[in-house]
Amino acid sequence: MSGHSKWHTIKHKKGALDAKRGKLFTRLIKEITVAARDGGGDQDANARLRKAVTDAKAANMPNDTIDRAIKRGTGDLEGVNYEEITYEGYGPGGVALLIETMTDNRNRTVAELRHLLSKNGGNLGESGSVAWMFDRKGYLMVDRSKRSEEELFEIAIEAGAEDVKTDDDNFEIFTTQEDFDAVVDAVKAAGIEPDAAEISMIPQNYIKLEGADARAMMKLYEAIDDHDDVQNLYANFDIDESEME
């Protein structure tokens, strides 16, 4: 598998665990609330909110829970005032980390993240220290069994995708932020349901980790990703499947 696929496989597996623990709902509610606060409660006019609601429905979140989160964001209901803060840092082996959070107490969040990093072989960096190593792009992952490479390539590229990559198990489609919705719509219109579809921070290069560094990085990744205030975690490491067991 390519480095990016391995990284997203890790993220996908973590997402399944989050759903079991109920943390996925917490993340989605925060995202809906902040999206409605920043862009209004009209999904047709607020692409971020529309995506958040789509993700919530895909996770089987009840409609009244979604509605309450939107109303808290627009001020129709009282709620917590979340602040979006991105932290940058390093993990074992020099891995770059981008940690997107939503918090109602930035002092608590930064102290807890600093503790997790130092406890697991990492450290916080200055603002801008690693962000330049990532590009914000649209990303779709499709199981190879769903369509031939030629068909998917034609569908994606005609809809505006920048690139389509393959590995043993998946196709990966990369788009600009502007073309993401059009590509997702085209793929779904062709009867293909992506296993992942998101705006993501894509690493420009990857650090290959093995042995102790790989295990330490996975331990740090899980510790940060489990933090209640962390919405998204991006990292530029590549490990073998055996290290993920």
Image (cartoon, grey):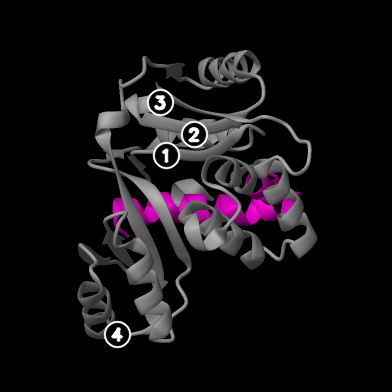
Q: Mark 1 points at which residue?
A: 234
Distance from Cα at disc 3 to Cα at disc 1: 14 Å
Q: How crowded is mark 4: few (under 14 residues within 10 Å), some or many (20 or more)?
A: few
Q: Name the residue under label 3.
A: 92
For numbered disc 2, what is the local secondary structure?
strand
For marks 3 and 1, give the one nearer the viewer: 1
User: Label 2 amino acid?
Assistant: Glu
Q: Is residue 30 above or below residue 160?
A: above
Q: Earlier in the sequence, mark 3 or mark 1?
A: 3
**Residue at 39% over, 70% down:** 184
Left or right, 26 with respect to 191, comes to: right
Q: Which of marks 3 and 2 is nearer the N terminus?
A: 3
User: Label 4 amino acid?
Assistant: Ser
Q: Mark 4 points at which residue?
A: 148
Q: Can residue 169 be seen in this view?
A: no
Q: In this view, does 107 lie above or below 241?
A: above
Distance from Cα at disc 3 to Cα at disc 2: 19 Å
User: Label 1 amino acid?
Assistant: Tyr
Distance from Cα at disc 1 to Cα at disc 2: 8 Å
For numbered disc 4, what is the local secondary structure?
loop
Distance from Cα at disc 1 to Cα at disc 4: 29 Å
> Within the magenta stretch, is there residue 87?
no
Q: Which of marks 1 and 4 is nearer the N terminus?
A: 4
Distance from Cα at disc 3 to Cα at disc 4: 38 Å
Count of marks overlaid on the render: 4
Please identify the quadrant where the N terminus is shown.
bottom left
51 or 10, which is in the foreground? 51
